[in-house]
Structures are given as structure tokens and as C-alpha cells.
Image (tube, rainbow, N blue to C red):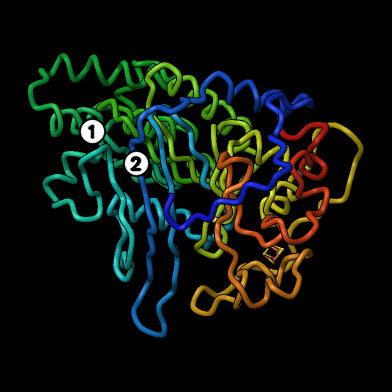
Amino acid sequence: MSGVLRHEPDDVVHVPDQPTSTAASTVASTVASSVPGRAEVLIEVRGLSVDYGLGDDAVHAVVGADLELRRGEVLGLAGESGSGKSTLAYAITRLLRPPGIITAGTARFGESVNLLSAGQRELRGLRWNEIAVVLQSSMNALNPVLSIGAQFSDVLRAHRPGMSRAQRRARSGELLEMVGIPADRLGSYPHELSGGMRQRVMIASALALDPSVVILDEPTTALDVVTQREILSELMALRDRLGFAVLFISHDLSLLAEIADSIAVMYAGRLVERASAAAIYRAPRHPYSLGLLSSFPALHGPRRALEGIPGSPPDLRQVPAGCTFHPRCGYAFGRCRSDPPPLLELDGGTRAAACWLQDGTVPVPPELGRHAPAAGLADGGRS
Ligand code: SF4
């Protein structure tokens, strides 16, 4: 894999397959039931870099990102606000607005489509048909003066011109029911629906043309936790039934640990860790991933103080030298302040982390070792 150094210490010990805690078991069963193995790669991103602005004032929002999304996979993209995760998604779907500029890298859909050089006609053919996007505030993007049925019908008329009016009506009802809303609400206007229902409508709309990839950018963040959980359960059931792949963007690493097959963690525009969801949940290898996991309370086990991550993300116009995380990292040592760590492949290439603690030259703290449970989460996280 480009940009990745291989590191396979002699004493490689693989992350065990079966977590022991209740919450971790939930993660394991999710992963076990849905990991697509070596399914075909639908989206392949290599060395992608995105700036906002030009010259010395340019904000380096994404730097050299590598990602793969396979058919049927749920890939979680985690990080704090400003870590570059949404920018990465906008770049590969060509939804990036000025002053955003793709400065390097490639992004492919399937074997033949270069997403970064595709013309508008080719992009129109891909969007919604093959790659659908649901944004955090998209529930507010519904047209307030058109009924839900009319808005579905518009989509179907534009992209499936051969469908009759009756077929469009039937498909619209089917889409609503798919997300748990009775078909008789097709005549409702957006203001007659709750926030959760409007977001369900947007998800149904994204699935209208049976896309193979759905990109969800914090799709439930604005909703209460009960509605959030219901929508996520429905979404995962739909993924199991329809087989689309999901790129799920969230700041909530513990939520991603539950729903994703694999997770990529971003910090200051860089990918800092990538592994299966179960592996990151049970044994994060990058201090930033550990910090994100430690920022959420456990629902079981002894009470503990929430640790969080000290400080705040850096100004992307002037990131710190060396490891960009070093001013906030409790494990930083000399080399961290001068040399940027590459993404090191670990455990026989099953995961990768950009941290000098993992290059085999210094002792690894137990909590960042191969079998370490995430602090405070070993005996139960979100459920
Ligand atoms: Fe912390 Fe150093 Fe690892 Fe960066 S490279 S995460 S500063 S220990």
C-alpha cells in the first residue's frame, strides 16, 4: 500500500477475535456478521491531499490519505471537528466547494472511474445512482413547499425517466416504509414530520436508486440518542439486506465501534490509525484513538473520571513539527517533536498506526499494546 511502511516485529501477537465484554461482544457480532472479507474494492483513495486556499495561507485539510471501501463494508471515519474527515468525503465525491482544492492523489470508483478527473456528465451518472450522500443537516434540505411524495417523485423522474407515475408512487411508498415510515405519509410536508422522520426521509431518498455506496456525514448527530439508535439500527438492517457499502463519518468513535466493520481515525488532516472496529475498540494502538475512546463513559463496571484529550486540534495552517499530535500527547518523547511518524503497518498488515511508539524501537505502554482494552471500556461501553 502506498505511503505505508511495513513493520512486522518478531513477536507479533494478533488481536484476539472474540472480545470478552458485553459491549465488545456486540461489536464482535456486528463485525462477524458483516465483514465482507476480500470483497471487491468500490472506492480506492491513494495519497489524497486537499487544501483550502493557496500559498502560505493554505489550510492543509487532508494530507496524503489512503482509504479503501469494499462492497458491503461499513467503514467508519473518525476524528474531532476539523480533522479533515468531511473534506475527504467531499473531495472524493467532487462536492468540494472553493476555496477547496485537491492538490494530490487519486480516487477511483470501481476499476475504471477516476473520480477526481471525471467530467460533470460522468459524475451525474455516478451520483445518487452509485454513490449517494447524506449530510448532517440534510434533513433541512427538504423542499418545504413540496410533499415528501413529490420530492421522491422528482428524483425518480430525473433518474429513471422510464418509470410510470404509478411506478414512481409505488417506489416512493416502498422507500418510506423501508425506513420505518408508513407509506400514507407520502402526502406529508417536511414541517409535518419530526427531525428523526425527516432524516429517515433523506436516507430513503439516498437509497432511491439502489446505490452501491452511501456516504453518511454525521447523519444522526442533531437527533436525540433514542432516535439516533433507531435510525442506525434501521440503516444497518438495510445495509445487510441491500448490500450497499457505507462510509460513516462521525466524531463518536465508540458509536463507530458498534456499527462499523473497520475504522480509520483522522487527526489534523492525517490518517493516524486504521484497523478493524473490534481491534480499535479493544486495543487502540495510537494515543489519539485511545483518547477518543476514553472520552466516552462506560455503562458497566466501576465509575471512573472521564479523561478526554487535553488541548485542542492545531491550526491547520501551521501544524506542529514532527507528530502533529505531540503537543496533546501524554506519551510524546524526543523524536515525536521533530520527525513525522509514517503510517506503520502492524500485526502482519491487518492494521496501521502513525506513532513512533509502534515502530519496535521503544517499549510500548501496556494500554497501547496488542491486547490492551481501551481505558474504561473493557467492561462495557455504549450498548
Ligand atoms: Fe504521541 Fe509520539 Fe505517538 Fe505522536 S508519535 S502519538 S506524539 S507517542
Quadrant where ligand 1 appears: bottom right
**Can the viewer see residue 224?**
no
Q: Do the residues labelled 1 and 2 touch (CB within 8 Å)?
A: no
Q: Which amino acid does label 1 sit on?
A: Asn
In the rendered view, would you say 293 is above or below 312? above
Q: Which mark is residue 244?
A: none
- Horizontal side of residue 284 vs 171, given as left or right: right
Q: Nearer the viewer, residue 191 or 363?
A: 363
What residue is rendered at 39% in x and 51% in y? 89
What residue is rendered at 53% in x and 29% in y? 232
Residue at image mark 2: 43
Q: Which of 372 and 304 is in front in this view?
A: 372
Residue at image mark 1: 129
Residue 38, by quadrant, is: top left
Question: Residue 306's spot in the image, x, y percent?
Answer: 82, 51
What residue is rendered at 35% in x and 44% in y? 44
- What kind of element bears circle 2? strand
Q: Nearer the viewer, residue 345 or 8?
A: 8
- What kind of element bears circle 1? loop
Could you give the CA–CA distance between mark 1 and mark 2, rounded to whole angstroms?
A: 15 Å
In the rendered view, would you say 276 is above or below 188? below
Is label 1's Cβ within 8 Å of ligand 1? no
Q: What residue type is labelled 2?
A: Ile
Q: Which of marks 1 and 2 is nearer the N terminus?
A: 2
Question: Residue 35's spot in the image, x, y percent?
Answer: 51, 25
Residue at the left extreme of this rendering? 162
Is label 2's Cβ within 8 Å of ligand 1? no
Q: Nearer the viewer, residue 128 or 270?
A: 270
What residue is rendered at 75% in x and 68% in y? 332
Q: Residues within 10 Å of mark 2 (few under 14, many from 20)?
A: many
